[in-house]
Image (tube, rainbow, N blue to C red):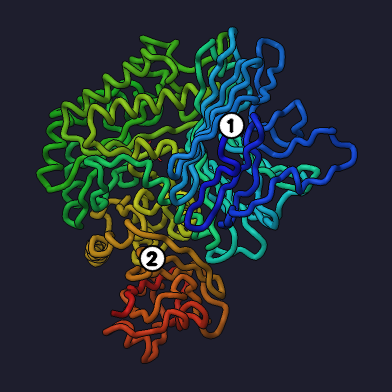
Amino acid sequence: MSLPFPSLHTAEASLVLEASGHGSPLWRHLGARVDVADLFPLAGSRTPASFSLDADVPAALSPPAGLGWFGPPAMALRRGARACVAVFDDVTAMLDGQTLRVVSRDAAAGVELEQTIAADQGFTLSTVLRNIGGDALAIDWLASALLPLPAGMARLVSWRGRHNAELVECTEPMPQQAWLREGRRGISGHGGPPGVFVLGEGATHHAGLCLALQLAWSGDNRIAVERDDEGCWYLSAGAVPQPGEAVLAPGECWTAPDALVAVSTAGRNGASAQFHAMVRARMDWPGGVMRPRPVHLNSWEACYFDHDADRIVALAEAAADVGAERFILDDGWFKGRGDDRAGLGDWTCDPVKYPAGLGDLAARVTALGMEFGLWVEPEMVNPDSDLYRAHPDWALHLPGRAQPTARNQLVLDMGRAEVRDYLFGCIDRLLRDLPIAYLKWDHNRDLAPAGGAAQVRGTYDLLARLRAAHPQVEIESCAGGGGRSDAGIAAFTHRFWTSDNIDAVSRVAMQRGFLAFLPPEVMGSHVGASPAHATGRAQALGFRAAVALPGHFGVELDPRALAEDDRAELADWIAFHKQWRHLLHSGQTWLGDGADGLVWQAQGSREEFLLFVVRTAPPLDRRPQPLPLPFLDAAGAVDLRLLRIAGGGHGHAAHSAPLFDAMAQGGARFAGSWLARAGLPLPPLKGESVLILHGRAAA
Ligand code: GLA
């Protein structure tokens, strides 16, 4: 290897390795940007430690677990019942611009590993393992990333969740021993994308060192932070295949899911900005560019399974009247689907509910000036379906064992080509026969029995095939709300349904969790009914709309059920969203907290942005404290216009002051440094209200 210190640099970070004779490159640094000129060799700086091997085995890109590396393993391999320890002794590193490719071979073990690290906004790590031996090679573990954490990291931020309570943020100190987040349900799960944020001492949303990782993977996975006895923390992450699943015949290879790694010195927001850029780069929009996100009306909470052509046409007319641009017919349209007990698998229109067929319905929707979208749940089958009666063996099962149902359904074995062919046939026919612009692709249960990596890859394969055949069709990933929102499936989809819980108070924290990993334009956020179906809590329409506004906006109610003034207000919010979506969906997102329970987010750029200041609970302080907006520190002068105060209900009118009146009329000018450090003065906000401001750098 001719490069002594193979290194990659982003604007904020450096990844530095050191050539190690013929072995796997050693880790020197992953963290804030450094200069590698005059770098001293690692060996010259490592003192011997007692009770250690005589030959030093420092952390390497792929260290020799079982032969001197005692930290977390990069891989665990077997040939039959024997452990196969790869000690790479033939390594080539090639740096091509911002991409480093390291090919490591151990001819004796019969293992070749190709690791590619591409640097742009962050680092994307790709790993392929090839069996170059003469007999079968079993992979029990292959890390997508095994990274040393920079010294001085202090906290871990992760998310957990369940159906209707996605993305609950958890912050904890660095572990003394180990920390683990493992998904075993076959989908990425309601805790959000498989990932973690690691924060340096004192790091905030806005400042300080933050290293974050997410796997581009929608199945079982393991993310661990472990401390070794040298005191260093290692972050490892990878997909978890089923036992015995990853067995390579000679010449075969196994591709680990990509690991997206964001390293920022601008805190959590800096890391999220890198994630957003990396996820945006993986997405495949029809025509190559994202169009303005059309406002949805989705039929589910408007009528659940209780619909027919008349009701849906009336709903579609009401949707068009308030300004919706895409109408999605949710669950219940296909044969036998009067409730959730039957029909999944048989993707033909219910002739009783829709005697003139879906073609007629779709034509009526498109005649209203809206796109037509359709709900499907391709990977599932009800035992009460023609498909199951014809092919009971197509559902995932273990011979001789029970097949646990969930929501009365089983999971099709997506690893089988004939299953994928059948599903391609069904969906392709729908897309060919009908003017469908959009599929809401659902997945309403955990996997039991497990489907392993084959299930995930089978689904990706089907999605890729459908995308290739129908490149103009956009797809939403949904799994009982946000059970499958991740950068893996993002390569084939264009939106995520964030949660079946549309309660705006619940949504505030959930959406912030979502935005940690994924950009706002793919965050499905709807105005739901009041009281919210998931929680029973009632909220003002303005509050519900303002909380939904930053994402891919939509409506999840029947506008005809609203009083006339509410319906007019909904139409007004939709128009407001259309006016501002270009700012919301193309730039950066900054999240922050204020005093007394306030949270805020800004979207756009430092030159022009929308700012949302959200108060969920009523204030406790007599007067609102100013709100520091650190992202504006270097912005020069900023003109702020108060666009709306949404929600806040009835009762006493909120007090105003001349400054806020001026901000609401022509706007007011502030120094960026004042806004960043002293803070934006705020009018009083009631519980469940959102202040929306427009900011623009002064010319
Ligand atoms: C899931 C989705 C809902 C809806 C139903 C239909 O729960 O999250 O939005 O589509 O399925 O059965």
Pinpoint residue 278: horizontal percent, then vertical percent. Answer: 42, 47
Pinpoint residue 652: horizontal percent, then vertical percent. Answer: 42, 82
Q: Is residue 516 left or right of residue 75?
A: left
Q: Is residue 384 left or right of residue 364?
A: right
Q: 591 above or below 460? A: below
Pinpoint residue 418: horizontal percent, then vertical percent. Answer: 36, 12
Q: Residues within 10 Å of mark 2 (few under 14, many from 20)?
A: many
Q: Which of the labelled discs sits on residue 255, or is there none?
A: none
Q: Which residue is mark 1?
A: 184
Whether residue 607 can be seen here: yes
The extreme bottom residue here reads: 658
The extreme left residue here reads: 367
Quadrant where the C terminus is found in the figure? bottom left
Judging depth in this view, the residue of 277 and 343 nearest the camera is 277
Which marked residue is nearer to the observer: mark 1 or mark 2? 1
Lower position in the chain sequence, tag 1 or tag 2: 1
Pinpoint residue 508: horizontal percent, then vertical percent. Answer: 47, 59
Callout 2 amino acid:
Phe
Report helix, strand or loop for mark 1. Answer: loop
What residue sits 51% from the left and 55% below the top? 271
What residue sits 54% from the left and 28% below the top? 103
Callout 1 amino acid:
Arg
Q: 49 above or below 386? A: below
Judging depth in this view, the residue of 318 and 338 nearest the camera is 318
Q: Which residue is mark 2?
A: 543
What residue sits 65% from the left and 20% below the top? 77
The picture quadrant where one finds residue 178 is: top right
What residue sits 14% from the left and 31% below the top? 359
Q: Residues within 10 Å of mark 1 (few under 14, many from 20)?
A: some
The picture quadrant where one finds residue 227 is: top right
The extreme right residue here reads: 50
